[in-house]
Amino acid sequence: MTQALATLLRHYVAIYPLVMALVWSGLALVYYWRRERRERWLLQAPRRPLAMPVSILIPCFNEASLLATTLQAALSVDWPEFEVIAINDGSSDDTGRQLNQWATENSRLRVVHLVSNQGKALALRAGALIAKHEWLVCIDADALLDRHALGWLMRHFPGRDRLAAVTGNPRIRNRSSLMGRIQVGEFSLIIGLIKRAQALGGSLFCVSGVIGAFRRSALHGVGYWDSDCLTEDIAITWRLQRAGWQVEYEPHALIWILMPETLAGLWRQRRRWAEGGLQVIISNLDLLVRPQQWHLLPLLVEPLASLLWAYALVACLLLGLPPAGGLALLPVVCLGQFMVSFQLDRPYDRGLAGIGFWMVWYPLVFWLVTLVASLVALPRVLLRQQPQRARWVSPDRGRLG
């Protein structure tokens, strides 16, 4: 290796995380100042759009142990006209019986039973096709929708004919373990900042699969969700934006979710995220030769730069190249990022103050797992012979306590 290349690797490994931490924090603060600060402490959306009935779609696969709380929350939202459609995607447990029982007792609930497991993408499509309403809110079957979430999501659509989707703000429910507490911080310190920064630029890498409001006619125009992609939420976000539709982020639209609390569960989740993200990135590389869509380039370049950084770091370690001196500033920059994100997310999560101490373990646990997942994902995606149906696997959802 030439001296010039070695120097480039060392400086890239040291400087890239510093630059991105500053970029995410700075853009998130601008987003807060322009769009968020005046309504920061409001619980209920300030304006309720009229004549916008909503269909809430809940795809289910082996959700018997968690179904009741999810349905209760969805059926209790503060919205004048809505229905809940639960799609039982070939569950082998008691999910189907429970759904039928709930439907007999709740006129707002409709149930669809698929004979065999088809995957989340096709389950969502089935729900969208039978929905009564144009506006669809899609959530996961282990998530608790906040009572006021629909108001915050739907307020963006009136007067914006090219707005296809609005994503909300997932918060972690399970906080009894170290891994659960770390993920609370991760969703604030990393994901929350990135969503704000991207939304400021008018586009998003992903409308979260756990909470997203969609215009059904926009979904129909792009062919709905991709059944071959491991991350159908990322894929549909890109389909919509490449077709000229807009997407938006709403931090007030809360949903409470469960996350893995074992290293094995975390690894499976992060590897799936990494592979699915790479699938979408590779399928959209033609963006580079389409100048009319270059406003989406930051969404393409940043994950590629992150992947390059992961491989550059491994190369430095294998070659015994110490990172350039700028890496010593990383703890200081991260501390600043943590402070910014805590302040921005305080209105949405009252337990953040007690999580700060546990974030010291974030680099050791999540950063390392995410790094390795990125390294493993690239060859797996490139060597995949042909598209494969992305079907459900029961995840590690941790525990409440």
Image (tube, rainbow, N blue to C red):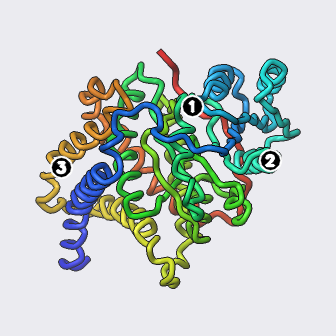
Residue 59 higher or lower than 278, as above or below: above
Q: Nearer the viewer, residue 199 or 376?
A: 199
Q: CA distance from mark 1 to mark 3?
A: 34 Å
Q: Which mark is residue 126?
A: 2
Identity, as a three-letter code, of the amino acid under mark 1? Leu
Q: Is residue 305 left or right of residue 80?
A: left
SS class, disc 3 = helix
Mark 2, Cα crowd under 10 Å, few <14 / some 14-19 / many 20+, is some
Ranked by sequence position, the earlier of labels 1 and 2 is 2
Q: How many marks?
A: 3
Q: Which mark is residue 333?
A: 3
For label 3, the crowd category at 10 Å Cα-Cα, with few meaning under 14, some 14 to 19 and many 20 or more, is some
x then y, percent, for residue 212? 58, 46
Tell me, yes or no, whether the two marked residues, 3 and 2, touch with CB atoms within 8 Å: no
| Picture quadrant where residue 48 is located | top right
Res. 159 image quadrant? bottom right
Numbered disc 2: secondary structure: helix
* Residue 145 image label: 1
- Mark 1 → mark 2, Cα distance in angstroms: 21 Å
